[in-house]
Amino acid sequence: MPFPPLGVRFEQLEETLRIAQAMWVGPAQPFEGSHFRLAEPLNQPPAISRPHPPILIGGGGEKEALRLVAQYADACNLFAFGGTEAIRHKLDVLKRHCEAVGRPHDAIERTAVGTVTIGTERGAAKSVIATCRELAQAGIQHFIFSVPSLHEIAQLQILGRGVIPAVAGF
């Protein structure tokens, strides 16, 4: 079955977020949307997190994804591969969407995802630390990254001994 067009997927995501919000705040009410119809949306067992489980929306689409983040999410996840100028721009767009819905920009946790390469030579942690510092200065609070060769114990040691302690305070 093919994926629906992107615009339809965003409409479905927004309806899903509206359904979830309704389920978290009160008794089950019928939901009638363009894509989903539920006679009695149930939330059993109820969520343990209060007021609801945290919502993270990933993507940097300026018209839809970041608008949905501003309106519904507790966190956003942007792509780090575009660099810090792109991150700053996306966070500025998010700030404008937050202003439009009357929500404080700082209420949203800002994360980024990317890939880093760690060499095993002396000073290998420096480039990863520099990347983390640049992202933090751009407004990212958490950097989620993959390391393609992490199965090599030396790289894991560099992360554990050199990178994590250095970036913990950013």
Image (cartoon, rainbow, N blue to C red):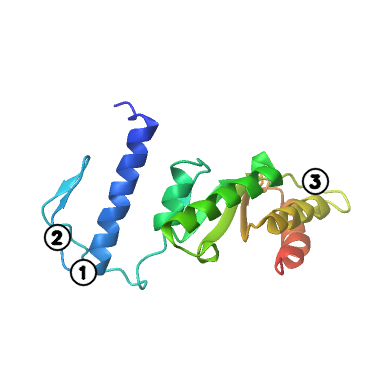
Measured in 3D between alpha carbons, the distance from the residue under mark 3 to the one under mark 2, in whole angstroms, is 55 Å
* Residue at numbered disc 3: 119
* Residue at numbered disc 2: 29
Measured in 3D between alpha carbons, the distance from the residue under mark 1 to the one under mark 2, in whole angstroms, is 8 Å
Q: Earlier in the sequence, mark 3 or mark 2?
A: 2
**Which numbered circle lies on residue 26?**
1
Between label 3 and label 2, give the one nearer the viewer.
2
Q: Earlier in the sequence, mark 1 or mark 3?
A: 1
Q: Amino acid at mark 3?
A: Gly
In the current view of this chain or complex, which residue is farthest to the left? Answer: 39
Q: Position of residue 153 (x, y in %)?
A: 72, 53
Please indicate, yes or no, whether residue 69 appears anywhere in the rendered image. yes
Q: Amino acid at mark 2?
A: Gln
Using the image, determine if residue 54 lies above or below residue 51: above
In this rendered view, identify the residue nearer to me: 53 or 157.
53
Q: Residue at x 28, y 54 (%)?
A: 18
Q: Position of residue 140 (x, y in %)?
A: 63, 57
Q: Quadrant of the N terminus?
A: top left
